[in-house]
Amino acid sequence: MKIKNWFYNKLGIKTFKTPSVFKKRWLRWILLFVMILTMVITRRNNLQLNIILYILGIAFLISLIFDEELWHKYLCPYGALLNMTNKANIKKVKIDENKCKNCGLCAENCPNNIITITKEEQSIENTECLYCFKCQDVCNFNAILYQKSQLLPPNHKQD
Ligand code: SF4
Ligand code: SF4
């Protein structure tokens, strides 16, 4: 949410960190189940209820208050499905260790908080990637790659 970030930076507003009680990957599967169940029940009973609209509203509110990762990584039902398709994706977002300068900008800007940058490790948890490419946009050294894993240098770590 570029506009939100710009606005918050201007006003000095900080979002809350993700509460540890929500840091459970299975939560989004429950929400996905509840969402599908609610859709089925409303269809069968001819009820006018736009579930997607409600979910978008809730996602928007949560993302205004908390770090974006809370919704994307732990609560979003769509994120649960994306996680499965990401596993099958042969292309990965990777960090070229030969180009990376360890500045940490990519990690700071990743909405899902899935980039690890330390002296010893530069890696991305691809199964949780949103493919927003914010990391690529902010990297001044062209060190973020999106390509088939085998095209990376042989010494590159796999996720
Ligand atoms: S922004 Fe680029 S140079 Fe900086 S840590 Fe990330 S990959 Fe490395
Ligand atoms: S594309 Fe980059 S910034 Fe976006 S979620 Fe994936 S790792 Fe994070």
Image (cartoon, rainbow, N blue to C red):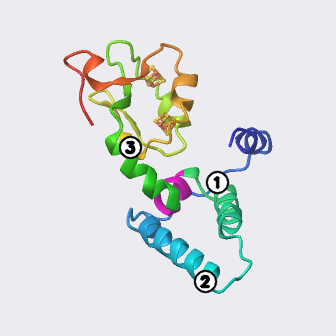
Residue 98 coordinates in the image, percent (x, y): 32, 13
Which amino acid type corresponds to the residue marked 2 in the rendered image? Arg
What range of the chain is rendered magenta?
Answer: 69-75
The quadrant in which the N terminus is found is: top right
Work out whether mark 1 precedes mark 2 in sequence or the reverse, and give the earlier one: 1
Which amino acid type corresponds to the residue marked 1 in the rendered image? Thr
Please give left or right for residue 148 compared with residue 70 in the image. left
Quick one: SS at disc 1?
Answer: loop
The quadrant in which the C terminus is found is: top left
**99 or 49: which is nearer to us?**
49
In the figure, residue 123 lies in which quadrant? top left
3 or 2: mark nearer the eye: 2
Label 1 close to label 2 by CB (< 8 Å): no
Work out whether mark 3 precedes mark 2 in sequence or the reverse, and give the earlier one: 2
Identify residue for label 1. Answer: 15
Q: CA distance from mark 3 to mark 1?
A: 28 Å
Instruction: Please give the label number shown on residue 44.
Output: 2
Q: CA distance from mark 3 to mark 2?
A: 32 Å
Quick one: SS at disc 2?
Answer: helix
Q: Is residue 5 visible?
A: yes
Number of numbered discs present? Answer: 3
Instruction: Please give the label number shown on residue 76.
Output: none
Residue beneath the point at 43% across and 17% down: 143
In the figure, residue 116 lies in which quadrant? top left
Q: Is residue 17 visible?
A: no
Specify whether tag 2 is near ligand 2 (CB below 8 Å): no
